[in-house]
Image (cartoon, grey):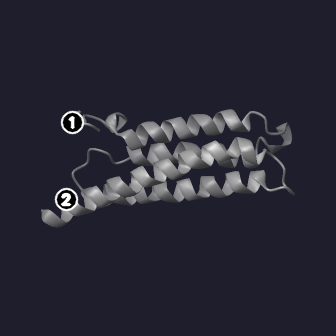
């Protein structure tokens, strides 16, 4: 954030981008076959929604190590999401065209960078206190 006061997890750029990523995943899975509704579609949507949910969880508590733990869980959900997307685009699976999944994977990379930066920032604050 550029000098803006952060009053809520909703003010965090990483949460906002995580929400955008989840929304993109919902959009991209609309084209998946109906027989995948409880399979890959569900897996992608749940892991995508888990990223901003874990960023929000424990926000504002005064115990920084616990919040960092939830941010790391968000990182794990992000890697799970990337794996589901990559698997869906594999030729022998063929649920989505690689060209459609590439922008979503770029969003994953961006959210991952933001998560790492936030974790580093919180870790550094913790070591100075």
Q: For the point 46% across and 43% down, which residue is it? A: 52
Name the mark on residue 125: 2
Q: For the point 60% across and 57% down, which residue is it? A: 80
Pointer 1 local density, CA inside 10 Å: few below 14, some 14–19, many at least 20 = few
Q: For the point 67% across and 33% down, which residue is it? A: 27
Quadrant containing the N terminus is: top left
Q: Nearer the viewer, mark 1 or mark 2?
A: 1
Quadrant hosting residue 56: top left
Residue 112 lies, in percent from the top left, at 47, 54
**Mark 1, secondary structure of its residue:** loop
Quadrant containing the C terminus is: bottom left
Residue 101 lies, in percent from the top left, at 69, 45
Name the foreground residue: 73 vs 128. Answer: 128
Residue 11 lies, in percent from the top left, at 33, 34
Residue 26 position (above or below residue 105): above
Marks 1,2: beta carbons within 8 A: no
Residue 34 position (above or below residue 76): above
Name the foreground residue: 38 vs 8. Answer: 8
Give the CA distance from mark 1 to mark 2: 18 Å
> Is residue 18 in view?
yes
Pointer 2 local density, CA inside 10 Å: few below 14, some 14–19, many at least 20 = few
Q: Earlier in the sequence, mark 1 or mark 2?
A: 1
**Mark 2, secondary structure of its residue:** helix
Quadrant hosting residue 26: top right
Quadrant hosting residue 49: top right
The residue where tag 1 is placed is 3
């Amino acid at each position: 954030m550029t000098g803006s006061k952060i009053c809520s997890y909703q003010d965090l750029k990483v949460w906002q981008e995580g929400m955008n990523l989840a929304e993109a995943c919902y959009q991209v899975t609309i084209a998946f076959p109906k027989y995948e509704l409880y399979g890959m579609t569900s897996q992608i949507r749940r892991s995508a929604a888990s990223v901003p949910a874990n960023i929000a969880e424990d926000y504002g508590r005064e115990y920084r190590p616990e919040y960092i733990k939830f941010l790391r869980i968000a990182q794990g959900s992000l890697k799970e999401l990337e794996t589901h997307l990559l698997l869906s685009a594999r030729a022998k699976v063929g649920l989505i065209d690689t060209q459609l999944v590439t922008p979503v994977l770029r969003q994953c990379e961006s959210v991952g960078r933001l998560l790492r930066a936030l974790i580093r920032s919180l870790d550094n604050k913790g070591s100075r206190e």
